[in-house]
Image (cartoon, grey):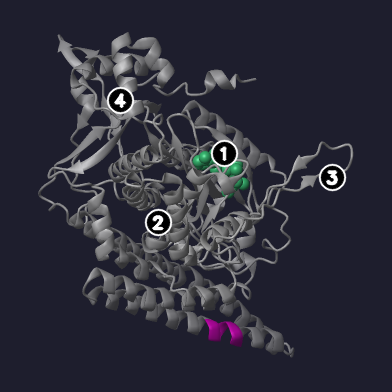
Amino acid sequence: MTNVPEMFGSLVFNDKAMRERLPKDTYAALKKTVESGTPLDPSLANTIASVMKDWAIEHGATHYTHWFQPMTGITAEKHDSFITPSGAGAVIMNFSGKELIHGEPDASSFPSGGLRSTFEARGYTAWDPSSYAFIKDGALCIPTAFISYGGQVLDKKTPLLRSMKALNDCAVRLLRALGDANAQRVIATVGPEQEYFLIDRELWKKRKDLIFTGRTLFGARPPKGQELEDHYFGNIRPRVIAYMDDLDRELWKLGIHAKTRHNEVAPAQHELAPIFTTVNVATDHNQLTMEVMKKLADRHGLVCLLHEKPFAGVNGSGKHDNWSLCTDTGENLLNPGKSPETNLRFLLFLTAVIKAVDLRQDLLRLSVASAGNDHRLGANEAPPAIISMFIGSELTSILDSMQSGAQYKGKKGNKMQVVETIPEFMADTTDRNRTSPFAFTGNKFEFRSLGSAFNIACPNVMINTAVADVLAEFADVLENAKDKETAVKKLIAETYAAHKRIVFNGNNYSDEWVAEAKKRGLLNLKTTPEALPYYTREENLALFARHKIYTAQEIEARKDILLENYCKVINIEALTMIDMAGRQIIPACIKYMKTLARTIESKTAIGFESQTEKTLLAKIDALTSAAYQANQRLSEATVKVKSVAGVEAQASAYRDTVFTAMQELRAACDELETLVPETDWPMPSYADLLFSV
Ligand code: ADP
Ligand code: MG
């Protein structure tokens, strides 16, 4: 038996540890920094560092590291031990305030998008006291922001913290304008649901594509996929539940509120959801969760795939970013309450989000753009590439009636009585919409377009900043209004009227919606190379400058890094395919053709017909030639694309030439897989991979 409350947070230097160990006034000062964002007095750093170190050593740590989130999307760490020579060959364990507050990793090997030249290696990491330090792999990990020598942002945390400040400032201003004198802070809260696949490690080792790219680049469809819908919420197999148990425990120790676990739609696909927290901590925790997921799989003889589309033909994996706004007085500003039609503050914040999403469709779309996620968006398994919002029929009619001035005729939830012995309950007033990219789900929005491998920081920077900007505009209007109630109603009605094109409560997977969205003038940015250039749209540069999130130069750098990443990913996939086709698949086919030819020869010698063998041989021969030629074309395409000038044009060229050639090669090889005996095929099949755990 495990005592979960005792285990929870045992590897975290959390509030409890701080309260117990820090001097009273130091604890109070640190808590104030964490809770209200006031700068920490540097003179306290030595005390905090020393206490933190003692705590860490007691919990088995020998090292410390600044833990940060460079533009690679994964976290980075460089361990330093606590040892300090104390004379006569002895050491003591030491950790200074300076070492806690700031570090100086060599920044030259992290993507900077040209923000610094390679010879300017200096970069700084700076302690983020609003996210607790924790122990991992024997090292005290200190969450930090990462910037260049020149002060430019090189990471994902810094802009997120900035966007939280912008959102807080603007939201508090608006609350004041509405007459709220209590709330001192407004925080974005986030709960990210994480999807993943688990496959057998021994099989994984036999697939170069999984090893190098995280997804299968070849693979004929197995006889059974997800069509029976028998995996979603199905009972969890023993090996998987053992893994999930272990995972929950490890996450709990790290103070992560792992809450929900279940099987997902595709075979071998699962989901984990934590309880929501502040967006900064949620981001750190999600990064940690992904890391622990991968590490623990190893212990169970499994591999955890976080790629957005590991297998063609079954659903890929996403991440749902549940986002809301909470005051320090504990109020959820997106909670409609019992009668939303009279809850003007709720309706005002709701319309602010509607306007923000409409104005910044491009930013939301590009924040979820990647080579991996391109496989999902628009493939009827994830929301389409078109950004729209679901708010449900009740809120739609409330806003419609506010716009038209008509009386809202309320609809109350139905009482549900299943059978008499089951307690009755109230049904929600609106259903859910699982096809919408940005769906209101009762008291929060669920941004459903994120890819499973994403760092959630960037999408949340977009939401926070876009909403902050509208809240500031609303505050401008309302601060000067004489009759507040009338002004609020007018603002809601006008804003909704101007931006309601973004609201769509229907089926986002339908072709009619694509046509309708076009009519409404909504963007439909189907691929990463189409989406990313919108980063530097004039209005977006102005938005980020206004709220001090990014300079124009920093955005330019980010766009380049992401486009380059897209090119590199496709390039690695192409090279892996060329290798697998050229050195595994085609040779296997040739070998089987030899067996067939010999069979024909010997059968003919003793007077037998060999019609079946001949037909099969001809078929395989033709397909092998097709595969060979497709492989040649792919090879050539990977060379030719290098000469395309400019990263935007190059990314498009990768999509149009290399990616297209990859699909042709795959088609020929997948058909060959259905003709060549299982024993001769050089890698595990989809059936093996998807149904063996
Ligand atoms: P569903 O997606 O089925 O609605 P849940 O209601 O359990 O599932 O919520 C999914 C995620 O949303 C969880 O991580 C949960 O903690 C998070 N969530 C719930 N309320 C909020 C909120 N106010 N702000 C941010 N996230 C929230
Ligand atoms: Mg959900």
Magenta highlight: main SS: helix
From the top left corner, tell me how far across and down residue 622 is, in percent.
Answer: 54, 86
Residue hosting label 4? 33
Label 2: how many residues lie within 10 Å, few (<14), some (14-19) or many (20+)? Answer: many
Task: Please state the horizontal and vertical placement of residue 621, each as a whole percent of the image.
Answer: 55, 84
Which of disc 3 and disc 1 is earlier in sequence? Answer: 1
Tell me the CA gap for discs 2 and 4. 30 Å
Element type at mark 4? helix
Mark 2 = which residue?
Answer: 356
Q: Position of residue 240 (x, y in %)?
A: 63, 42
Q: Amino acid at mark 4?
A: Thr
| SS assignment at label 2 | helix
**Taking 2 as reference, is 139 left or right?**
left
Q: Nearer the viewer, mark 2 or mark 4?
A: 2
Q: Which residue occupies 17% across, 15% down?
A: 85
The answer to which of marks 1 and 4 sits earlier in the sequence is 4
